[in-house]
Image: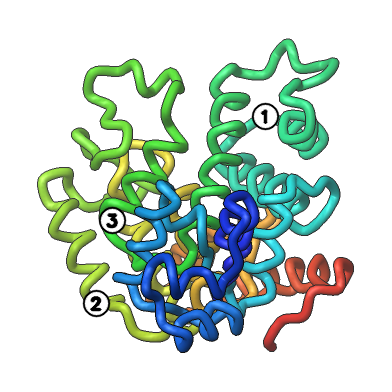
């Protein structure tokens, strides 16, 4: 479904009606009927409208997702609604994902940064990077919501990393590639990861195996495991990986999951044991999904499954 509220506003500003588009731009009555029914119209017609109103496509029409969760997140984000699903998603996803990686910010401090752009009392001993990466993570979540339906690509993954690490102390290091793959070997949980010179091929291979077909929750969790094994960036791999999983759940109409810091040990066990027992990591992700379902139930947002 498509929303033509922008076009309707442009018509109102010019004192025109939809029927005038036929006379002014030679747009057929059939196309005008499609606009009235919120259906997709041909790209060449949309380009004519953009030229006529001297604006971009997004100023005239937006695609409205049939996914009620994604739709709610986008609507609340656009309207800057406080205290709703979008607000709680930002705070809980950001707090838990950063906390898993060692952030010292509390959930209350994370909430304050989101709501007021301040940290409040007791924040004097918090590392500056924790605050910067929290603000960056909010922007990364926005990017995920805006691009949820986009195909997962190398450039999208790198953009998530760029958003997350921009302005941090790491970004000032000459060998730390913000928004690009690692230059130095790294480990995760004491385990070796893919060597820097092999990362690009490994990520491309993973994306090719994953493909563009419909995916299940297990497919997304498996992608997450393989991504973390590659560990393509110098730092920020866990957060980028969990953001990817959140995005892909939204894309395929699956209720997203948020791994809580309190379940960190189960999450790491699941990653370690994936090849021997998939149930550990799947169970942890399903638990995180149940947590998000309770949030959806509270706000009265319907979902499948």
The quarter of the rendered structure image containing the C terminus is bottom right
Query: As drawn, which residue projects farthest toward the front?
Result: 23
Residue 261 at least partly seen: no
Q: Residues within 10 Å of mark 3 (few under 14, many from 20)?
A: many
**Rendered image quadrant of residue 37:** bottom right
The quarter of the rendered structure image containing the N terminus is bottom right
Q: Nearer the viewer, mark 2 or mark 3?
A: 2
Name which of mark 2 and mark 3 comes first in the sequence: 2
Name which of mark 1 and mark 3 comes first in the sequence: 1
Figure label count: 3
Residue nearest the viewer, comparing 75 with 2: 2
- Mark 3 lies on a secondary structure that is helix
Query: What distance separates the C-alpha of mark 1 from that of mark 3?
Result: 27 Å
Left or right: 24 in relation to 178: right
Q: Nearer the viewer, mark 2 or mark 1?
A: 2
Q: Position of residue 105 (x, y in %)?
A: 70, 30
Q: Residue at x 76, y 22 (%)?
A: 119
Q: Is residue 276 above or below residue 83?
A: below
Q: Position of residue 39 (x, y in %)?
A: 52, 82
Q: Position of residue 136 (x, y in %)?
A: 54, 34
The circle drawn on residue 209 is 2
Query: What distance separates the C-alpha of mark 2 from that of mark 3?
Result: 14 Å
Residue behind mark 3: 230
Q: Residue at x 76, y 67 (%)?
A: 291
Residue 69 at least partly seen: yes
- Mark 2 lies on a secondary structure that is helix
**Rendered image quadrant of residue 64:** bottom right
Residue behind mark 1: 104
- Mark 1 lies on a secondary structure that is loop
Left or right: 15 in relation to 301: left
């Amino acid at each position: 479904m498509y929303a033509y509220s922008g076009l309707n506003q442009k018509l109102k500003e010019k004192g025109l009606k939809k029927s005038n588009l036929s006379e002014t731009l030679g747009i057929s009555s059939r196309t005008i009927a499609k606009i009235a029914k919120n259906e997709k119209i041909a790209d060449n017609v949309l380009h004519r409208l953009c030229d006529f109103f001297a604006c971009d496509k997004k100023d005239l029409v937006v695609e409205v997702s049939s996914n009620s969760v994604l739709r709610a997140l986008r609507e609340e984000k656009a309207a800057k609604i406080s205290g709703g699903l979008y607000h709680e998603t930002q705070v809980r996803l950001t707090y838990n994902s950063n906390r898993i990686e060692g952030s010292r910010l509390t959930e209350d401090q994370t909430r304050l940064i989101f709501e007021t752009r301040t940290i409040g009392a007791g924040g004097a001993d918090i590392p500056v990077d924790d605050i910067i990466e929290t603000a960056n993570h909010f922007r990364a979540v926005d990017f995920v919501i805006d691009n949820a339906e986009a195909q997962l690509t190398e450039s999208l993954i790198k953009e998530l990393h760029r958003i997350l690490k921009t302005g941090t102390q790491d970004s000032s290091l000459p060998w730390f590639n913000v928004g690009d793959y690692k230059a130095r070997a790294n480990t995760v949980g004491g385990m070796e990861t893919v060597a820097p010179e092999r990362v690009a091929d490994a990520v491309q291979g993973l994306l090719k195996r994953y493909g563009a077909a419909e995916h299940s929750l297990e497919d997304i969790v498996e992608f997450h495991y393989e991504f973390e094994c590659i560990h393509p960036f110098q730092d920020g791999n866990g957060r980028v990986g969990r953001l990817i999983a959140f995005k892909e759940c939204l894309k395929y109409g699956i209720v997203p999951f948020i791994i809580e810091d309190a379940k960190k040990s189960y999450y790491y066990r699941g990653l370690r044991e994936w090849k021997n027992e998939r149930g550990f990591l799947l169970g942890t992700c399903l638990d995180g999904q149940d947590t998000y379902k309770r949030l959806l139930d509270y706000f009265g947002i319907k979902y499948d499954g």
